[in-house]
Image (cartoon, coloured by chain):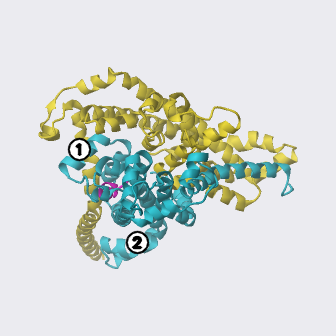
């Protein structure tokens, strides 16, 4: 009896070990196939994302096209010195950060306000129609938006000067030579462009609130305004905290299209419209490749630090919403 | 119960109607300028409704539409090509990331995800693409660098992970290879995520002006949006197009450059504005899919 059992277990053992062997072979085969599937993607990431990261060493070199990236002469931190001792450094950094903060704060207020108003609309069809109209700019290129801005601001024919004229104001303002007006213009254009899309997130969060909270508040005599202040907004705080923190991670990268297209890259406007991205682009066009890539590296490194820091804050608040 | 037409509701509607007008009127303005006569523009400026209707700008453009046809051709080709290829490559890459039996999942995820946090930037990319890959001034510069996007791959992977694991298991027990499982099991079930990503890619390619700005020098290869930028910025470029297309033999014939500028914008943006409402559903859906942790 005992020996039979022993025999059986021996057979069993042999079987499992055989299965283990073939299983291992399967794991290898599967993983080889999976690797082949991922290979085109791996190569594309390598060529178009990782090779430029290697190329960044020219920030520490004097670039000579004939010698290539590796062959060019090392110059240490000279390119960085050149940038940071110029007047541009402060200007472009300040503009980039201030515009980002401006867009975050005003964009948030506008998006939440729109979401609250949509939420208070009775007709669902109306919500859909208004929302569709307001996300329209998301589908248009920045060039077309620049057209619209130009049609408004054109000094001789533009609509804005005509409107000012009707109300007895000056009707010949050359907006493209008035740097002081552009913080307002760019803010309006940016908010106009993104508010429809941004409000969707908050609207969705509002839709998730338990209806009975509002009903009981109504029975207790709370009006619409009080319901908004004491129920709706507190429920939005978590999502606001997260979107804002994540947005803070990107304050160092500006929207190149907005600043390059709507301003028509007019030099007079640089004091208030030049950001790191437009500055780097001009460096590229002007052939100052090393300095431009030094500025790009500065932007990337600060950006990386900001994203990692803000993300770890978000993870502390709510791990579900962190990026990693 | 609140009345449907209370003062509060009416105020809200009034607000949104005005807000919506700020989105609709600019396009009416562009159309109006494009069909205004040049003399009317000079006299009255841009007006929301044309004072004197004149379709000459369109006639001039259609008379010899070489540049706009070239740009349309290039843009349609690279938009479709990029969309098809990138959806294919990105789903292929996302599939191993979604498989529990994949041993290199962790490394690959990091390899892809890291590109979202850090990048070489404009100038190093420029040097690699021009000096080493020689992609500048070819149609491939529009396509190849745009094929992979870390964020899109993560969205696709998350979608794949949501498919019932049993399906893949069953296919594997029946002896299907990973490749076959991907094509015959996963792909047919993934139309929602594929159409969403395809839509993201095609919108961003259709609106691509930066690539041409940095890499393209031949007018034949200008993307539609870059052509528009040149028209808006450079009066010589408009004049050149106008001269080429001018229907008149007479030297003193005045070309309606101002309205032509806007007519070009309408011709270039038109398709997107017409197609847009049909795709809006995908866009919002994509947002909700995208709101998943990476």
Instruction: Determine whether the residue tagged by mark 2 lies in a helix, strand or loop.
Output: helix
Tag of residue B206: none
User: The magenta stretch spans which residues?
Assistant: B142-149
Chain A drawn colour:
yellow
The image shows residue B28 at horizontal and vertical percentages of: 61, 56
Q: Nearer the viewer, mark 1 or mark 2?
A: 1
Could you tell me which quadrant the N terminus of chain A lies in? Answer: bottom left
Residue A185 picture location, percent across and down: 56, 37
Identify the residue shown where x is 59% and y is 48%.
Answer: B46
Residue on which the image places disc 2: B187
Q: Relative to B275, is A296 above or below? A: above
| Image quadrant containing the C terminus of chain A | top left
Viewer-nearest residue: A121 or A15: A121
Residue A64: in magenta span: no
Label 1 to label 2: alpha-carbon separation: 37 Å
Q: Is residue B112 left or right of residue B46?
A: left
Disc 1: which chain?
B
What color was chain B assigned in the picture?
A: cyan
Out of B59 and A189, give the one closest to the viewer. B59
In this view of the protein, can residue A238 be seen by the observer?
Answer: no
Q: On the rendered structure, is A1 left or right of A191? A: left
As drawn, is B162 to the left or to the right of B98? right
């Amino acid at each position: 009896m005992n020996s039979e059992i022993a025999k059986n277990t021996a057979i069993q053992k042999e079987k499992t070990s055989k299965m283990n062997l073939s299983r291992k072979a399967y794991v290898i085969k599967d993983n080889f196939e999976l690797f082949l599937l991922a290979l085109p993607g791996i190569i594309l990431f390598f060529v178009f994302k990782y090779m430029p990261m290697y190329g960044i060493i020219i920030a520490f070199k004097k670039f000579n096209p004939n010698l290539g990236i590796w062959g060019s002469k090392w110059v240490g931190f000279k390119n960085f010195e050149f940038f940071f001792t110029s007047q541009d450094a402060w200007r472009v950094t300040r503009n980039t950060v201030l515009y980002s903060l401006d867009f975050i704060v005003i964009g948030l207020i506008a998006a939440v306000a729109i979401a609250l108003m949509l939420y208070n609309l009775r007709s669902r069809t109306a919500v859909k129609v208004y929302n569709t109209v307001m996300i329209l700019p998301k589908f248009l290129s920045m060039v077309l938006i620049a057209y619209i801005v130009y049609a408004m601001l054109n000094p001789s024919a533009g609509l804005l000067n005509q409107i000012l004229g009707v109300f007895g104001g000056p009707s010949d303002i050359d907006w493209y030579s008035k740097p002081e007006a552009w913080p307002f213009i760019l803010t309006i254009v940016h908010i106009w462009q993104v508010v429809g899309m941004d409000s969707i997130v908050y609207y969705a969060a509002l839709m998730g609130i338990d209806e009975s909270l509002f009903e009981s508040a109504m029975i207790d005599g709370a009006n619409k305004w009080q319901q908004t202040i004491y129920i709706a907004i507190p429920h939005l705080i978590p999502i606001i905290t997260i979107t804002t923190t994540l947005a803070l991670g990107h304050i160092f990268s500006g929207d190149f299209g907005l600043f390059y297209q709507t301003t028509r890259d007019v030099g007079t406007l640089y004091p208030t419209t030049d950001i790191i991205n437009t500055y780097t682009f001009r460096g590229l066009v002007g052939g100052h490749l090393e300095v431009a890539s030094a500025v790009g590296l500065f932007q990337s490194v600060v950006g990386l630090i900001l994203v990692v820091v803000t993300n770890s804050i978000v993870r502390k608040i709510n791990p579900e919403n962190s990026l990693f | 119960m609140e009345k449907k037409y209370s003062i509060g509701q009416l105020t809200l509607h009034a607000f949104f109607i005005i807000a919506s007008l700020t989105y609709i009127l600019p396009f009416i303005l562009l159309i109006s300028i494009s069909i205004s006569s040049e003399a009317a523009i000079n006299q009255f400026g841009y007006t929301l409704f044309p004072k004197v209707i004149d379709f000459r700008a369109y006639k001039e453009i259609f008379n010899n539409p070489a540049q706009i046809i070239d740009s349309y051709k290039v843009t349609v080709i690279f938009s479709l090509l990029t969309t098809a290829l990138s959806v294919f490559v990105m789903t292929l890459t996302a599939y191993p990331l979604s498989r529990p039996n994949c041993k290199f999942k962790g490394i690959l995820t990091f390899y892809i995800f890291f590109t979202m946090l850090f990048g070489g930037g404009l100038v190093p990319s420029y040097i690699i693409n021009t000096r080493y890959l020689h992609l500048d001034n070819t149609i491939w510069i529009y396509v190849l660098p745009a094929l992979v996007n870390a964020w899109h791959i993560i969205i696709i992977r998350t979608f794949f992970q949501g498919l019932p694991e049993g399906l893949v298991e069953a296919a594997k027990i029946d002896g299907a290879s990973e490749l076959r499982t991907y094509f015959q099991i996963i792909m047919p079930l993934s139309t929602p995520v594929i159409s969403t990503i395809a839509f993201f890619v095609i919108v961003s390619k259709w609106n691509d002006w930066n690539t041409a700005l940095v890499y393209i020098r031949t007018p034949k290869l200008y993307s539609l949006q870059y052509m528009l930028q040149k028209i808006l910025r450079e009066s010589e470029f408009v004049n050149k197009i106008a001269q080429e297309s001018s229907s008149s033999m007479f030297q003193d014939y005045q070309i309606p450059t101002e309205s032509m500028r806007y007519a070009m914008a309408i011709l270039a943006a038109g398709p997107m504005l017409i197609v847009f409402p049909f795709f809006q559903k995908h866009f919002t859906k994509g947002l909700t899919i995208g709101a998943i942790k990476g």
